[in-house]
Amino acid sequence: MDPKWNEDQPIYKQLRDRVVVMILEQVLGDGDALPSVRNVAAEYQLNPLTVLKGYQELVDEGLVKKKRGRGMFVNDGACVILLKAERQRFMEKEWPEILATISRLDLDVKELLVQAESIELTKDSGG
């Protein structure tokens, strides 16, 4: 996790978002333990209650479960739930802005797709 915090958003929300990214990128998979509240608090010099509040949001969303005396663990299917929510958020919030930018700049969608494919091919070949 990146130790830099944005001053525009509460740290507990940023912590929650970082765990979400770790789940989406499959750094944390189904059944994996989250780093302990105590370890995260010590490593990033945070109040343990701040870490707990971020983790509690994940519990409230059904992405993580508490196991008394053992810690917190990623729920089965958390990545699928997050992907669905992130895709919906993208389609409702980001995609309309992207389409407006494409239109405003009079870009050719087919050309953009060709360019995106060539970027993906370059990434896949390690270059």
Image (tube, rainbow, N blue to C red):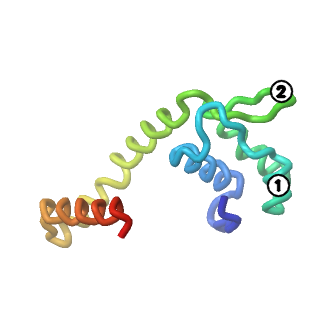
The answer to whether 57 is drawn above or below residue 47 in the figure is above
Pick whichever of labels 2 and 1 is earlier in the sequence: 1
Q: Amino acid at mark 1?
A: Ala
Do callouts 2 and 1 mark residues in contact (Cβ within 8 Å)?
no
Q: CA distance from mark 2 to mark 1?
A: 19 Å
Name the residue that disc number 1 marks.
41
Q: Amino acid at mark 2?
A: Arg
The answer to whether 25 is drawn above or below residue 103 in the figure is above
- Asked whether, in this view, residue 69 is left or right of residue 31, the answer is right
Q: Residue furthest bottom?
A: 105
Q: Which mark is residue 72?
A: none
Q: Residue at x 62, y 65 (%)?
A: 8
- The quadrant in which residue 6 appears is bottom right
The N terminus: image quadrant: bottom right
- The quadrant in which residue 34 appears is top right
Residues 111 and 93: in front is: 111
Name the residue that disc number 2 marks.
68
- Asked whether, in this view, residue 72 is left or right of residue 127, the answer is right
The answer to whether 70 is drawn above or below residue 93 in the figure is above
The C terminus: image quadrant: bottom left
Q: Secondary structure at mark 2?
A: loop
